[in-house]
Image (cartoon, rainbow, N blue to C red):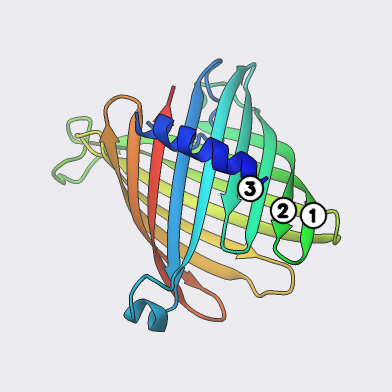
Amino acid sequence: MRCLVSLLLPWLLGALLGPAAQAGAWARAPGEVFLSFSSNLQADADTLASGLADASRYDSLYLEVGLGRRLTFGAEYGQGEFTREAMAFLRYTLTPPDARWQVAFDLGAGRREVDQLGERDLLRAGLSLGHGFARDAPGWPGWSGRGRAEGWMALDAVAVQDTTLDTMRWKAEATLGLTLATGHALMLQLLAEEWPGNDVSYGINPSVVFRLGDRSNVELGMRATFAGQEAYGLELGIWHRF
């Protein structure tokens, strides 16, 4: 798995550098391809006080391909200091493209590798809700649509079953996005997550998404996680749609 990623990562980064985040409940158009790369640095307050050199880093790649008939194929790969995880899934959007509320579910399978502990087989099930909106804005400068606030709301939940250890983890994420007249966007994400043997952790992730042409975006954000110990970090994301 490491060899495959070492070969693909430079090519994917080149492609990403050459709108919209992952589609969630919205089905990709037939033939549309979306790629993203993100990197997160995170540490507790004491570690951050001495700099980012000792912060933990997690990198991820994400792919979506529109198959038509409201089907979207997705794949993701994540890598931390001691772990690597790959997952592929198929999402079906239940609602028509012009519906105000979008609803989708997905099923997938993958594998997780942990240093010194070997590999584990995974199964995934997810549910996504989405809603786009445009309404009168309260006179704030910069909003798109000539006095209209345009944006989206989304709720994504996923459960992952480790079939090797017979354990379950889950994650839920709520997103609010607002589009500016420049094409840039503001995003706020709230998340909750539970891993086997650990308490539920909560997080907040505000970010700014900069538009680079018609098909590329760069996301810069901050992240705070609250569990047994508070942790803070930075996030960089690069998106490209073909």
Type of amino acid at the residue the image marks with label 3: Arg
The spot of residue 154 in percent (x, y) is 50, 44
Task: Give the side of residue 204 with respect to residue 30, left or right.
Answer: left
* Quadrant containing the N terminus in the rendered view: top right
* Residue 152 locus on image (x, y percent): 41, 39
For the residue labelled by badge 1, is the local secondary structure a helix, a strand or a loop? Answer: strand
Rendering coords of residue 34 (x, y %)? 49, 29
Q: In terms of secondary structure, where does tag 3 sit?
A: helix
Q: Which one is nearer the viewer's eye here, 51 or 208? A: 51
Q: Earlier in the sequence, mark 1 or mark 3?
A: 3
Sort mark 2 into few (<14), some (14-19) or many (20+) by Cα contacts within 10 Å: some
Q: 88 or 53: nearer the eye?
A: 53
Mark 1 vs mark 2, CA separation in Å? 5 Å
Q: Amino acid at mark 2?
A: Arg
- Mark 2 sits on what residue? 112
What's the residue type where badge 1 is placed? Arg
Q: Residue at x 41, y 48 (%)?
A: 176
Q: CA distance from mark 1 to mark 3?
A: 15 Å
What residue is pinned by disc 3? 2
The quarter holding residue 21 reads top left
| 205 sits left or right of 105 in the view | left
